[in-house]
Amino acid sequence: MSEFSTPSDETRQQALASLTRQLVQNGHPEQYAQQMAVAAIFQADLELRNAQLSHLLSWLKENYPDVHSQGLDLVEKTREEFEQRVKEG
């Protein structure tokens, strides 16, 4: 079983440099432009992961309904565990 694929570090670095340049060209100070670019790339990564998970759950529902409910339970359990770790610090 393979993990979700993610952009390579090189791809991320290229995206960061390109987006930072674009933000600087739009008049943002360089130190803020880089932070804005990092935030935008991080948000895009989150949206990609969300889309991957949604697509997988939809596929399970259509092709393996008996496994789909177990998948939903696992997703919920993962959310609960994450929230607990955040609360505990």
Image (cartoon, helix red, strand yellow):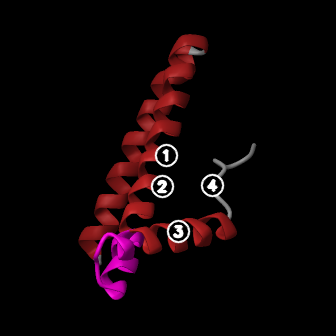
Q: Could you say which is closer to the camera, residue 43 or residue 49?
A: 43
- The earlier-in-sequence mark between 4 and 1 is 4
Distance, label 4 to label 2, CA atoms, is 8 Å
Distance, label 3 to label 2, CA atoms, is 16 Å
Segment tinted magenta in the rendering: 23-38
- The earlier-in-sequence mark between 3 and 1 is 3
Q: Dot 4 lies on which element? A: loop
Q: Dot 1 lies on which element? A: helix
Residue drawn at (36%, 85%) of the image: 30
Q: Are marks 4 and 1 in contact (CB under 8 Å)?
A: yes
Neighbour tally class for label 2: few under 14, some 14-19, many 20 plus, Cα within 10 Å:
some
Looking at the picture, does residue 70 appear above or below residue 62? below
Whether 34 is among the magenta residues is yes
Residue 16 in the image, given as x and y percentages of width and height: 51, 71
Q: Dot 2 lies on which element? A: helix
Residue at which label 3 appears:
18
Give the residue type that dot 1 points to. Answer: Leu
**Pair 3/4: label in front:** 3
Looking at the picture, does residue 61 appear above or below residue 51? above
Furthest-left residue in view? 87
